[in-house]
Image (tube, rainbow, N blue to C red):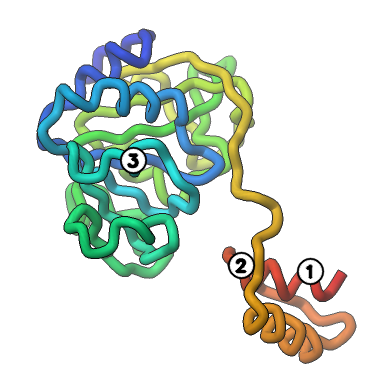
Amino acid sequence: GRTTRWTNAQEAIGAISDGARVFIVGDAMTPNHLLEAIVAAKDQWNRLEIVLPGMGRRIPLLRHAGNPFHFVSTQAGSLFDELWGTGTVDVLPCRLSDHQQLCTPEGPLPCDVAVVQVSPPGPEGMVSLGMSVGVPLAVTLTAPLVIAQVNAAVPYVFGAGEIPVEDFDYLVVQDEPFRDRPSTAELDTTSARIAERAATMISDGATIQFGTGVMPDAILRQLW
């Protein structure tokens, strides 16, 4: 069993060993307070491998690529534009349905550490992974070291993302607002024309399945 400690970010991050592979949950659920602590403590490691599936915005660790942070992503996105060719980032393409087992002991990227963000405990002594469950759930349940930022802004969502407090090694209380991606993105001329053309093909009353990204958002804006 684990010995759960409510502590500060410095103590929690100090438990990460040199050479570890560290999963960090992304986008709106990114635990920014813990990431700032990791950057502040960067000199304690020679190398950390940082797994960032689903991370769509820049984080402070990227400013220290190679010293000591090396990155693995499942998306070759613009997040890493300045790092291509530097040997500090690798891409492991995979389907969204594969993300659940990606960082577990049976997956291709078994992680030593999971760094996530959760809600405050509910009346049953459980916390919730909030708005991001599909990617971080399995690694949170299987990583040898699990560190969570407890943020009152995280909604308590019932279901698979409910986890007992005792399943975490370190819990760090730090409230902060969500820092999500901008609601709109700049489109180049070609992408804007594609969105306009695609929107004309959607008939009135249609049922639409859409994914994440600039193009789906642009097409939906054409339908307003």
The amino acid type of the residue labelled 1 equals Arg
User: Label 3, on which residue?
Assistant: 63
Q: Tag 1, which secondary structure? A: helix
What distance separates the C-alpha of mark 3 from that of mark 1? 34 Å
What distance separates the C-alpha of mark 2 from that of mark 1? 11 Å
The amino acid type of the residue labelled 2 equals Val
Figure disc tally: 3
Comparing 42 with 128, the one in front is: 42
User: Label 1, on which residue?
Assistant: 221
Estimate the x, y position of residue 21 in percent, counting from the top left.
Answer: 19, 41
Work out whether mark 2 precedes mark 1 in sequence or the reverse, and give the earlier one: 2
Work out whether mark 3 precedes mark 1 in sequence or the reverse, and give the earlier one: 3
Estimate the x, y position of residue 75 in percent, counting from the top left.
Answer: 38, 64
Q: Tell me what residue is drawn at x 18 percent, y 24 percent.
A: 43
Q: Tag 2, which secondary structure? A: helix
Q: Tell me what residue is drawn at x 51 percent, y 16 percent.
A: 174
Give the position of the N terminus as an image quadrant. top left
* Residue 167 visible in image: no
**Viewer-side label of 3, 2:** 3
Q: Tag 3, which secondary structure? A: helix
The amino acid type of the residue labelled 3 equals Arg
Give the position of the C terminus as an image quadrant. bottom right
Which dot marks residue 214?
A: 2
